[in-house]
Image (spheres, grey):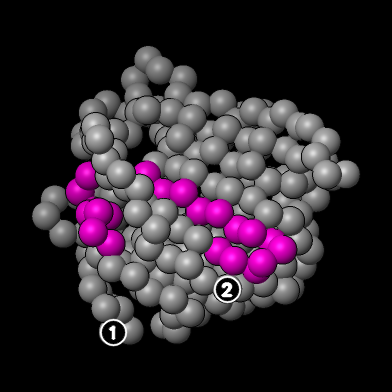
Amino acid sequence: MRLSRSSRVARGGLWASALLSTVAAVYSGGALAADGKPPADRQVTLNGTAKLVHRAGDDQPVIRLTNDSFKQAGSAWLTERADLTRSFEIAFTAHLRNGRNGADGIAFVAQGKGARALGGWGGGLGYRGISRSVAVEFDTYRNTPDPSSNHLAVALGGNPDRHAALAESSTPLYGKPFHARIRYDAAAHRLTVHVRAVSPGATEQLLLDQNVDVARTAGVTSGWIGFTGATGDVTSRQDVYDWNVTTPSA
């Protein structure tokens, strides 16, 4: 993976495109070597248990938010801030696995706290307590407020116990890779989330469609976007890769 940026002028604004691309984590197991200090050109800030890992002999790292241990929390943010008053789209692949059961899941988060923001473990999914935030959960463990161990949710203000929107996922979020696409329409204050399996012929499904003003909820016009993840008394190895972001530069 290399995190590269290119820009173009669109509708009077400066747009940046960031590509975080790798195919290293589409399998369970395999030889991976840790890379805890990402080169500057990758422009991603890692916190807590988050790190970059590589397939042996391949310079294509994956963001690993948690790694099969108890009570972990990790976050990974694009270091360059994004203009949250404008529309953006995020597409990525995730692979959450570790035996038959796993916890707790991951979240895509837009937030106004900073590139070092990290929330609570377990059901906190790594973003609990990041008060100025909008989170899209991909939750694989049923905690008290959750409908199931395979659901998506939108949560505001760093509180995973209160859901602005919920949806069961017909695509398994645990055990096999899945692909997600999140789009924010800033003019309409509309957040949509599509999910599909990573398999031939799989079709995308719209699972969440929620009205939210991301910039107002994050408390800033220029904020940080990225991923969080956590484990609790049940563990999971949680990887994010093929992360493609199209968003205005702040």
Q: Which mark is residue 144?
A: 1
Q: Which mark is residue 211?
A: 2
The residue lying toward the viewer, choosing from 41 and 11, is: 11
Residue at the image position 41 percent from the left and 54 percent from the top? 194
What is the x, y in percent for residue 134?
57, 69
The span from disc 2 to disc 1 (Cα, nearest Å) is: 25 Å
Asked whether residue 180 is drawn in magenta, I would say yes
- The amino acid beneath tag 1 is Thr
What is the x, y in percent for residue 106?
40, 58
Q: SS class of the residue under badge 1?
A: loop
The reply to whether residue 149 is in sight is yes
The residue lying toward the viewer, choosing from 33 and 126, is: 126
Residue at the image position 49 percent from the left and 74 percent from the top? 155
Image: magenta residue range: 169-191
Q: SS class of the residue under badge 2?
A: strand
What is the x, y in percent for residue 213?
67, 72
The reply to whether residue 130 is in sight is no
Image position of 240 with respect to 230: above or below: above
- The amino acid beneath tag 2 is Asn
Q: Earlier in the sequence, mark 2 or mark 1?
A: 1
Mark 2 Cα within 10 Å, few/some/many (few <14, many 20+)? Answer: some
Asked whether residue 42 is drawn in magenta, I would say no
